[in-house]
Image: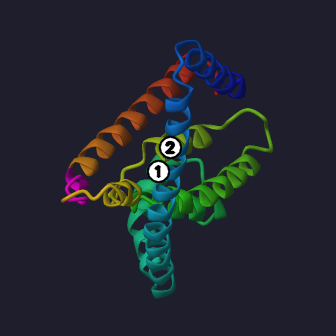
Amino acid sequence: MINYIWVGMIVIGIVFAAINGTMEELNEAIFAGAKDAVTICFGLISILVFWLGMMRIAQNSGLLDGLAKLMSPIAKRIFPEVPPNHPAMGYILSNMSANMFGLGNAATPMGIKAMQELKQLNGDSDQASRSMITLLAINTASITLIPTTVISIRMSYDSVAPTEIVGTTIMATACSTLGALLIDRFFYYRRIRKGRK
């Protein structure tokens, strides 16, 4: 469906430009957009490589394990159905840690592995379990301490203070995470009251 929407927008844009005689401006916008995309990608690559390297150092030094142990009591309360020593819990904690450092690309493989493990815990059912829904909500709203991607984009556009958004990002993502958890629990307990698991 999304492909049809994109194709429709492109066709409408080209037809509109042809009718108004602005095909030259359209071509300039296409090439300028492509150039900006490449510039942003290179900026993102550099910052992501740096933070992924830092994450690897933190992993090898045991810092990530320490962070996972620190977050473990919280994760046990958020995911009560997942056994503490189950591989799913390790992937969930790794996913949450990567998201906290704004490394969405590094968090995604951990999130996928966590979902696979949670699906096995759910008896390979096609219906999402409580833990799977909670993980998706947290992963989407994820509290972020260092918004590396946004900092990288701001640096690419020569921001005077690219890191000034850190404080507001922590506040905004803390609110979104709390909101996601409250909504997740609200719908879970509503389903329980209706007699469904």
Residue contact at pointers 2 and 1, CB within 8 angstroms:
yes
Judge whether residue 59 is colored magenta.
no
Image quadrant where one finds the C terminus: top right
Where does residue 144 sit, x and y in percent of width and height?
A: 36, 54
Look at 19% across and 59% down and name the residue there.
160
Q: What's the CA distance linking mark 2 and mark 1?
A: 5 Å
Residue tagged 1:
36
Q: Main secondary structure of the magenta part?
A: loop
Where does residue 89 sit, x and y in percent of width and height?
A: 58, 60
Residue tagged 2:
33
Query: For this rendering, which residue is in front, 173 or 28?
Result: 28
Taking 61 as reference, is 42 above or below it? Answer: above
Taking 19 as reference, is 90 above or below it? Answer: below
Image quadrant where one finds the N terminus: top right
Amino acid at circle 2: Gly
Query: For this rendering, which residue is in front, 72 or 58?
Result: 58
Residue 127 sits in quarter: top right
Look at 49% across and 64% down and name the residue there.
42
Taking 74 as reference, is 69 above or below it? Answer: below
Can residue 83 be seen here? The reply is no
Where does residue 153 sit, x and y in percent of width and height?
A: 38, 55
Magenta-colored span:
161-167
Where does residue 123 sit, x and y in percent of width and height?
A: 79, 44
